[in-house]
Amino acid sequence: MPTTVLVEYTYEAPLDDAAVDAMVAKLKRCFEIAEVTWRSCYLSLDRKTQIGVFEAPDAHTVQSAHRMLGIEFVRSWPMQRVF
């Protein structure tokens, strides 16, 4: 059963849609190989904080994909839906 993994990112300057699209494109190929699915993405109203929700075999797989591609993140953890 896949694990739901939350990844938090922060940015100095507000993130624009083109930057989000570029990150998705960069991660997509790696995620396909690692069996990671990007479920959703949330961006704060000031566009300086982003949360990604993924499904993967484990949290380490998601973290490794980010590190391998040089995509920085603040923290990441496996999670479960409560309600």
Image (spheres, helix red, strand yellow):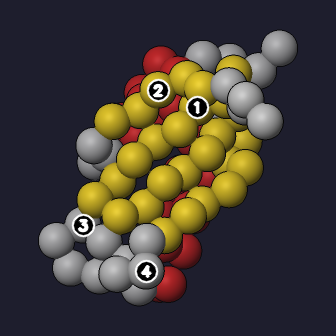
Q: Cβ–Cβ below 8 Å for labels 2 and 1?
A: yes
Say which residue appears at 58% left-offset and 31% top-offset.
Answer: 5
Circle count: 4
Label 2 and label 1: CA atoms lie apart by 6 Å
In 3D space, how far apart are the residues under numbered discs 3 and 2 (Cα atoms)?
19 Å
Pick the residue in front: 79 or 32. Answer: 79
Q: Quadrant of residue 16?
A: bottom left
At label 2, which amino acid type do we have?
Answer: Trp
Task: Determine which quarter of the picture holds residue 12.
Answer: bottom left
Q: Horizontal placement of 69 versus 60: left or right?
A: left
- Residue matched to label 2: 77
Q: Amino acid at mark 4?
A: Leu
Q: Residue furthest front?
A: 83
Q: Tell me, yes or no, whether the two marked residues, 1 and 4, touch with CB atoms within 8 Å.
A: no
Q: Position of residue 63 (x, y in %)?
A: 43, 30
Residue under pointer 1 = 5
Residue on which the image places disc 4: 45
| Residue 72, x across and y down, in percent | 28, 48
Residue type at the position of mark 3: Tyr
- Label 1: element kind: strand
The residue positioned 54% from the left and 51% from the top of the image is 52
Q: CA distance from mark 4 to mark 3?
A: 13 Å
The one of 34 and 3 positioned closer to us in this rendering: 3
How far is mark 1 from mark 4, CA to CA?
Answer: 22 Å
Q: Amino acid at mark 1?
A: Val
Which label's residue is closer to the chain start, 3 or 2?
Answer: 3
**Residue bearing mark 3:** 11
Alpha-carbon neighbours of circle 1 within 10 Å: few (<14), some, or many (≥20)? Answer: many
